Image: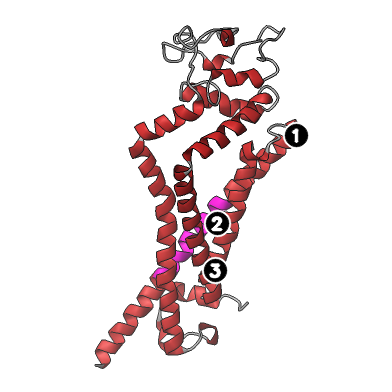
């Protein structure tokens, strides 16, 4: 009996130490990632304010990066601190926050699919807002150019969305009036140099006439079609997003059970480790030597 009890106690201590290292490493990795994202977001926002680009907050990638970075930094810091101190309150906050994030992400995806028409209208509306200031908002211009070239599309709903831009407004008096940017133009060869004037005056022509000149399909529909055609890649992307969070929830829950078992058997860890735990190597005791908070 004594041998079995000692082996069980050893296994519990091993799982406790292993889970502690694993959870601390997990939280530290996301803490570092959150810090990097936050730094990039702050730099991008400083540049945006400097050049006064992307006035709409919805369209500003820097705002999204800052919010994501702050969330990851704070939540991961709570996880690191809770793991180092065996603080059940902080561990619960960390775990429940991950659970809430998972639920919100799932709900957001379900709502976006359920109300697909409203989602498309919202996207089209905000893209048109960006098109209005296309040549002034450098960040949006780069994003829109990339999307139009990558997905072979033009505008939000279709190529005539460029009518809201003052330079492409139809009828207009400038050289680009009734036109679209050159990134809407059809290319037949890889890395082909596009004529920058190929999109001039196309808004006065029909879709059939423009089949070989510009991409007449809107970028919103083009994106959704790409998602459907590349469902395997999207499935992998969703797994990359959801699995680490789910893994964090499971590991945190397992570690909390070990801490609760240790508290029930030895008393609160803040009272100091049991005598037999002192016989373990130094590394396994480092995390128990943090100053009490």
Decide which of 59, 206 is in the foreground and name it.
Answer: 206
- Residue 212 in percent (x, y) is at 44, 8
Q: What's the distance in space between the residues labelled 3 and 1, CA to CA?
A: 38 Å
Q: Which mark is residue 50?
A: 1
Decide which of 246, 155 is in the foreground and name it.
Answer: 155
Taking the spot 35% from the left edge, 79% from the top edge, the residue there is 12
Q: Viewer-nearest of labels 1 and 2?
A: 1
Q: Quadrant of the N terminus?
A: bottom left
Where 149 falls versus 282 (above or below)?
Answer: above
Q: Which residues are magenta?
A: 19-34
Q: What's the distance in space between the residues labelled 2 and 3, CA to CA?
A: 16 Å
Secondary-structure class at tag 2: helix
Q: Is residue 88 within the magenta segment?
A: no
Q: Quadrant of residue 178?
A: top right
Return the disc, 1 or 2, that comes first in the chain's sequence: 2
Secondary-structure class at tag 1: helix
Q: Viewer-nearest of labels 3 and 1?
A: 3
- Residue 173 in percent (x, y) is at 72, 7
Taking the spot 30% from the left edge, 83% from the top edge, the residue there is 8
Where 233 falls versus 160 (above or below)?
Answer: below
Q: How many marks?
A: 3
Secondary-structure class at tag 3: helix
Taking the spot 67% from the left edge, 15% from the top edge, the residue there is 169
Which residue is label 3 attached to?
A: 93
Q: How is the image coloured?
A: secondary structure
Which residue is label 2 attached to?
A: 31
Q: Bin the neighbour count of mark 3 within 10 Å (Cα to Cα): few under 14, some 14-19, many 20 and up.
A: some
Q: Quadrant of the C terminus?
A: bottom right
Q: What's the distance in space between the residues labelled 1 and 2, CA to CA?
A: 28 Å
Task: Tell me if I can see residue 212 in this picture.
Answer: yes
């Amino acid at each position: 009996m004594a041998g079995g009890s000692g082996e069980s106690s050893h296994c519990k201590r091993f799982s406790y130490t292993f889970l502690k290292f694993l959870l601390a490493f997990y939280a530290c990795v996301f803490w570092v990632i959150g810090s990097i994202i936050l730094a990039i977001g702050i730099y991008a926002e400083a540049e945006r304010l400097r050049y006064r680009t992307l006035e709409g907050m919805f369209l500003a990638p820097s705002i999204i990066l800052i919010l994501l970075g702050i969330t990851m930094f704070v939540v991961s810091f709570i996880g690191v601190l809770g793991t180092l101190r065996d603080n059940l309150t902080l561990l619960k906050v960390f775990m429940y926050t991950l659970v809430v994030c998972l639920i919100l992400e799932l709900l957001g995806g379900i709502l976006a699919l359920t109300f697909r028409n409203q989602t498309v209208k919202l996207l089209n509306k905000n893209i048109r807002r960006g098109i209005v200031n296309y040549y002034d908002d450098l960040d949006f211009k780069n994003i829109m150019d990339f999307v139009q070239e990558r997905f072979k599309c033009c505008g939000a709903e279709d190529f005539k969305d460029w009518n809201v831009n003052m330079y492409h407004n139809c009828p207009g008096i400038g050289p680009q009036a009734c036109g679209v940017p050159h990134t809407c133009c059809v290319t037949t060869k890889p890395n082909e140099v596009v004529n920058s004037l190929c999109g001039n005056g196309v808004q006065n022509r029909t879709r059939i006439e423009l089949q070989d000149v510009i991409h007449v399909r809107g970028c919103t529909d083009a994106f959704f079609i790409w998602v459907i055609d590349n469902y395997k890649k999207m499935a992998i992307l969703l797994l990359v997003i959801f699995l680490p969070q789910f893994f964090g929830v499971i590991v945190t829950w397992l570690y909390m059970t070990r801490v609760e078992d240790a508290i029930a058997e030895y008393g609160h860890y803040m009272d100091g480790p049991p005598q037999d735990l002192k016989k373990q190597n130094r590394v396994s005791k480092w995390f128990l030597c943090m100053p009490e908070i």
